[in-house]
Structures are given as structure tokens and as C-alpha cells.
Image (cartoon, rainbow, N blue to C red):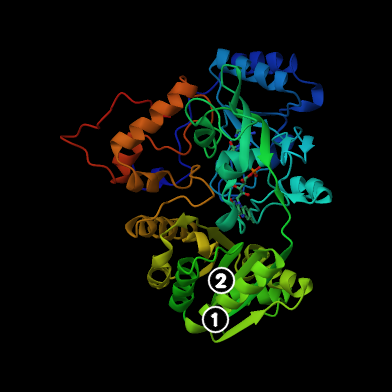
Amino acid sequence: MTADALRPANLEEPRQLGEAEKRDLVAALRAILPGDALLIDDEALRPYECDGLAAYRRKPLLVALPETVEQVQEILRTCAARDVPVVARGAGTGLSGGAFPLSNGVLLVMARFNKILEIDADNRVAQVQPGVRNLAITEAAVPLGLYYAPDPSSQIACSIGGNVAENAGGVHCLKYGLTVHNIQQVKMVTMDGELVTIGAQSLDAPGFDLLALVTGSEGMLGVIVEVTVKLLPKPERAQALLAAFSTVEQAGDAVAAIIASGVIPAGLEMMDNPAIRAAEDFVKAGYPVEAEAILLCEIDGTDAEVSEDIMRVRELLLAQGATEVRTAKDEAERLRFWAGRKAAFPAVGRISPDYYCMDGTIPRKNLGAVLRHINELSDEFGLKVANVFHAGDGNLHPLILYDSATPGELDKAEDLGGRILELCVEYGGTVTGEHGVGIEKLNQMCSQFDAAELTQFHAVKAAFDPAGLLNPGKAVPTLHRCAEFGAMHVHHGQLPHPELPRF
Ligand SMILES: Cc1cc2nc3c(=O)[nH]c(=O)nc-3n(C[C@H](O)[C@H](O)[C@H](O)COP(=O)(O)OP(=O)(O)OC[C@H]3O[C@@H](n4cnc5c(N)ncnc54)[C@H](O)[C@@H]3O)c2cc1C
């Protein structure tokens, strides 16, 4: 196998369907769905060629847009009976290729499941369909004094089903937890069409904690058709600080110092100089463009808590060598501080024809050292890197700038991205932060996990989906792939479990 064959999108597809099989499949799906809910024309399929990992494109065999749970059940049963793979898709904002379609499979788009079924303010929960946008939940809950805490930067577009499948994070997750900590129950249809309820309407559910297993399972265990999310009361007050540093190491150390002090900010984000300049140029947030790094720190809570913690953090930041610390005077300034951070990805998109967003996590105490290493790698590969990320969680998002029109640059960007993820593992971190593995990080999973662990992951997948038809080839690499990638020990030419399926 060549190095090229190990690029993220170079996946073996399951068997191809013959013409007669395709006709039979289309006829069977037409009997389940109304005419406008089945897309088969080339032009109609084009918008579904890729997700947020847009460097890779492939047209699905067809797109199904179900609207009811029964339709989802029937579609899955129909596909299972014909050995046809299925990829679920929410809003398609995923950055690791989780919803990358199969040319011989059905893309099951959940966009029409877009209703908020109930908001129970007394119990602070909401039952929502999976296609509901993340931000729409908060918008519906705000009149009741409530909100949904996990806030991915893509929250205006991404769906709650996609959030559960990726265990999405966001600025607020440092204090309020990831998606897994903010949901209570999921209803999901398995590949054989069974509707299962996981979790409960109470805080604990009997049996194994399958809710945590399903959260972050990247559409490989079942299709989520309903989610019960927890809602929180809107805090009385929120205030933000902006601190400038002359080195990224100092900013990294300041993050560790804030957490060590016992203060838990509602958000603690870092941007390095290329990201600061790009964001300032784009949204005029008033960022200090000479700073090598800035930290944005938000404190929320009661009036008294916020006043006290803001003072403490301010002193800490100055003690850690901040050259400037600004406290937002009012709500308008607080929103301006965040506007630059929230627009940082599109801002970087303005200064480079293409960028590749990586996602890995490291222990917070290593932030300074890892960022220095990333700079060295950036010089070695000759590609600029802008860093804008959830510093409080140690969740890095290096944005690798490249030009896909220059031959070989995409490959180089991917190789640099792979090296950065391996660096995260070397520093005791993980290759996944919040964007999942998808097709993007399959090779790095081989560095993170050994053969025995990967074998167990395949066994979990097989327990839900024995035929391996739901989102095959994503998230968990085959042992063959790892052996080819060179990140697995092969004894006398034998893979530990050669009988495992090659998805
Ligand atoms: C500009 C930008 C900023 C981003 N910022 C963040 C961030 O701050 N934090 C963060 O966590 N992510 C972020 N993301 C990534 C992305 O928005 C999240 O991963 C999000 O959770 C994906 O949701 P989606 O609805 O778009 O899912 P999709 O991309 O459609 O799918 C993602 C995965 O979920 C599966 N899936 C989708 N719906 C279902 C379902 N109903 N049942 C079963 N499986 C399903 C798919 O098969 C796929 O594996 C960002 C993306 C962009 C483009």
C-alpha cells in the first residue's frame, strides 16, 4: 500500500451495488418516502458530497430525507436487508469527515427532524428532534430564563443530533461540561430498525451507562431520532477579561495558573498572533495586534461571585506577566471581545486560500511547550499555523494555512496535521478534542490505541451493528490500516486479529 492510500479519504468502500440492486433499492425507498424526500439526480446530490472537511468529496448513491421515526426504521430495515451501508448526516458542519458519504450507500439526512417537542421549564429539560440547530434550543429556552450550555462555534448551524454523535464542545464546556454532561436521554434506531431508548428522564438510569457510549459514537451505533437535553438557568451576570502576553508560553502558563487557583471560568480561550491579526482585521474587536497571544476569560454567576472572581483572575493574569488586562465595561464590550474569537475561523479563511483545522487535546500544563513545538513544526513544513482554541480545556485548534492550488500542499498540510496530533499523544493528550475522528484521524488512532484496544472498539461496534453497515470505515481504524501506517507492532508478519473485517 502506498503512503497516498493512507490519506484520510482513501477508504476502501464496501462492495459496489449492481444496476438491478440499485433499482430495487430505489423502488423500496420510494415506497417509504414521499417523492421530494428521495434525491437521486446528480445535481441534487452535489450539496451532500462533503461535510466541513471539504477537501474530500464523494457523491452518495442517494440521499434520503425522512421526517418520521417510522420512516427511519423502515429505511434502515430496507438497507439492512439489502446489505446497503448508511451514513447519517445532521447539518454537515463536522470537521473530521464523519458524514462523508459512500458512493454505494444511502446518506440519511436528518434535517427534517427539526422540531422542539417540549420544553419542561420546571424540570429544566427539553425534548428535541435531532435536526434542531444547537442555537435554536437556547433561543427557545431564553424566554423561560434558561439556556443550553454547550456552544460550539458552529452553533448557528450544527444540529443537536450531530452534537451528540460528536460529543461536541464549546467555550462554555470548561465550566458546564461537554454534550455528554448536558443530555439525559437519547432515542435511537439501530441498523435493524429497532427503536431504543438510552438514558432516562431521571438523572440516573439502570444498567450500563450506554448514554456515554452513544455520545461521541459518530453515527456508528445507531441513528439518533430524539434527544432530551438539560437546560440551565441563565446566570445573573457575565463579565469578560482580555489579557495580552508577549509570549505564548506565558499565556499557556496563565491558563494553568487560573485553573489551579480554583476559579472555573465560563470560558477561557487563547489566540496567537496570526489569529489575533486575522480576527482584528475581520471584525475590529479592538484586539492588541502586537501581542503574541491573548487570553479571553469569562466569569459568570451571581453579581458578588463575578466581582470577586474577576478581581482574582485579573491579579493572576498580571502576576503571570500579562502586558495588559482589560475588563469589559459593559455587555457591548463583552460581546465585542467574543466577536473576534467567534469569527476567528472565517477570519483566517480570509488570509489564506485554504486552511486545515486540527483538533487535539493536551494536559493544560503543557500548553506552552506544545505551542512552541507546533511553531517548530510549522517552520519545518514551511506552512503557517494560526492557533485559536479552548485553552481552559487544553483543546487545541491549530489552523494550518495552505493553498490547494499548489501541488502537494494539501498532502503537506495533512502530514503536518498528523504530526501535531501525534505531538498531542506524546504530551499525554488525545487525538480527539471535540471534532471526532471521522476519516480524518484514522491513522493517528493507531498511535493512540494499541491492537487490543482497537479490537474492543470493533467489538462494541459489532454489538450494535454486526454487519458493519452504519457509517463503515469511520472513527476506528482497521488493524490492517494501522499495520500499513506503521504504528502497530506486527509479530512475525501476523496481525493480532487478522480475521477482523476490513471496513
Ligand atoms: C466554523 C466551525 C466551527 C466549529 N466549532 C466547533 C466547536 O467549537 N466545537 C465543536 O465541538 N465542534 C465544532 N465544529 C464542528 C461541528 O460543528 C460539530 O462536530 C457538530 O457537532 C457537527 O454537527 P452536524 O449537525 O453538522 O453533524 P454532521 O457534520 O452532519 O455529522 C457529524 C457526525 O455525526 C453523525 N450524525 C449526525 N446526525 C446524526 C444522527 N441524527 N444520528 C446519528 N449520527 C448522526 C454523522 O454520521 C457524523 O459522523 C465546528 C465546525 C465549523 C464548520
Q: Residue at x 61, y 17 (%)?
A: 193
Does label 2 point to a residue whose CB lies under 8 Å from ligand 1?
no
Is label 2 or label 1 in front?
1
* Mark 1 element type: helix
Q: Which residue is drawn at 60% across and 82% down?
A: 325
| Camera sees residue 278 | no
Please tell me in which quadrant of the rendered image residue 307 appears: bottom right
Single out the residue that lies furthest toward the front: 304
Single out the residue that lies furthest toward the right: 143
Q: In this view, does 62 lie above or below 90?
A: above
Q: Is residue 276 above or below residue 75?
A: below
Depth check, front residue: 251 or 349 = 251
- On the image, the x and y values in percent for residue 437 come to 48, 44
Q: Mark 2 points at which residue?
A: 271
Left or right: where 438 falls relative to 179: left
> Cα distance, mark 2 to mark 1?
20 Å
- On the image, the x and y values in percent for residue 214 come to 53, 33
Q: Do the residues labelled 2 and 1 touch (CB within 8 Å)?
A: no
- Within-10-Å neighbours for mark 1: few <14, some 14–19, many 20+: few
Please tell me the numbered disc located at residue 315. 1
Single out the residue that lies furthest toward the left: 492
Depth check, front residue: 401 or 208 = 208
Q: Which residue is drawn at 57% across and 44% down?
A: 181
Q: Is residue 268 above or below residue 20?
A: below
Left or right: where 268 falls relative to 285: left
Left or right: where 134 falls relative to 421: right
- On the image, the x and y values in percent for residue 404 come to 55, 59
- On the image, the x and y values in percent for residue 321 come to 48, 84
Depth check, front residue: 221 or 419 = 221
Q: Is residue 229 above or below residue 461?
A: below
